[in-house]
């Protein structure tokens, strides 16, 4: 696909901001987040349920989003949601790459993978399982632990990702006090896993 400087598409955007990545392998790094609206996964514990209905959020041109990113020193751009892959992200990611930026996506994998990505964080959800073709492309598997049964869910996908994929267990925020000790114990018994904490919530940044 040949991209012209004048090309643009519109995407529903709940919010976009420059902050630190708070989770997973790139935790602590400066990153520009673009939170796209629209999600049909329906996690009961989702902390951004207001992102689900794309019609409730304004449309933004990809060229305008790129302009916003370039006003900051950001080198990493994280596309999140909602479920970002409900949208075709080919043009957006190509424009970001053309600007010399690194593209990261945080996805449940429940929709076909579009776009060109430097890092794919797959966070599978029981409410709508990942598409099989997305799973082996993940650079990072991040499983949210809400109940003890989620450890088995995590192992199911650990067996399907590539051998180089980073493996993370993350406590659901609302039950973190209860779940984190269980995760620590599990990781000590299964050291292929690492702990992911939502440090942005602890230090009160977006």
Image (tube, rainbow, N blue to C red):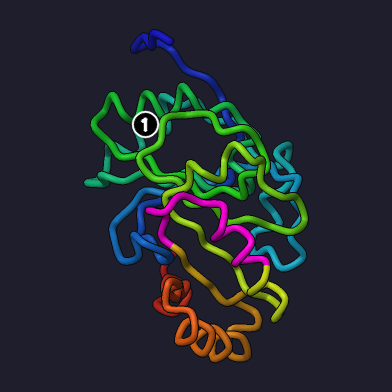
Camera-side residue: 17 or 171?
171
In terms of depth relative to the viewer, which is nearer, 77 or 186? 186
All told, the count of numbered labels is 1
Q: Is residue 115 above or below residue 196?
A: above
Q: Is residue 162 magenta?
A: yes
Q: Residue 204: x and y, percent? A: 43, 74
Task: Name which quarter of the figure residue 65 lies in.
Answer: top left
* x, y percent for residue 57: 65, 40
Front residue of this view, candidates 142 and 61? 142
Q: Position of residue 93 (x, y in %)?
A: 41, 29
Residue 99 is one of the magenta-drawn residues: no
Horizontally, is 28 left or right of 198 in the view?
left
Residue occupying the point 45% across, 72% down: 193
Q: Describe the element under mark 1 as helix, strand or loop.
A: helix
Residue, x 47% and y 67% (percent of image)? 168
**Image quarter (top left, top right, bottom left or bottom right) of the N terminus:** top left
Whether residue 4 sits left or right of residue 121 in the image: it is: left
**Which segment is the magenta one?**
153-166
- Residue 154, percent from left and from top: 61, 66
- Where's the C terminus, which quadrant? bottom left
In percent of the image, x 26 and y 28: which residue is there?
99
Q: Residues within 10 Å of mark 1 (few under 14, many from 20)?
A: some
Q: Quadrant of residue 145?
A: bottom right
Residue, disc 1? 66
Residue 143 against residue 173 in the figure, above or below? above
Q: Which quarter of the figure has residue 54?
A: top right
Q: Residue at x 28, y 60 (%)?
A: 29
Above or below residue 30? Residue 84 is: above
């Amino acid at each position: 696909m040949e991209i012209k400087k004048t090309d643009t598409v519109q995407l529903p955007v709940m919010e976009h901001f420059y902050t630190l990545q708070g989770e997973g392998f790139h935790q602590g790094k400066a990153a520009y987040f673009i939170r796209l609206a629209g999600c049909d996964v329906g996690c009961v514990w989702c902390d951004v349920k207001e992102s689900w209905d794309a019609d409730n959020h304004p449309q933004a041109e990809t060229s305008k989003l790129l302009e916003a990113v370039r006003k900051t020193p950001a080198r990493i751009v994280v596309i999140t949601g909602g479920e970002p892959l409900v949208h075709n992200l080919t043009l957006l990611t190509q424009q970001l790459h053309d600007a010399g930026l690194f593209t990261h996506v945080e996805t449940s994998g429940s929709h076909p993978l579009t776009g060109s990505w430097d890092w794919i964080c797959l966070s599978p959800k029981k409410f709508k399982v990942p598409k099989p073709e997305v799973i082996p492309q993940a650079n990072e598997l991040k499983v949210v632990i809400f109940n003890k049964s989620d450890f088995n869910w995590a192992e199911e996908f650990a067996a399907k990702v590539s051998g180089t994929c980073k493996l993370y267990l993350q406590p659901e925020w609302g039950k973190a006090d209860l779940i984190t000790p269980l995760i620590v114990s599990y990781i000590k018994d299964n050291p292929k896993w690492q702990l992911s904490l939502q440090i942005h919530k602890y230090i009160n940044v977006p």
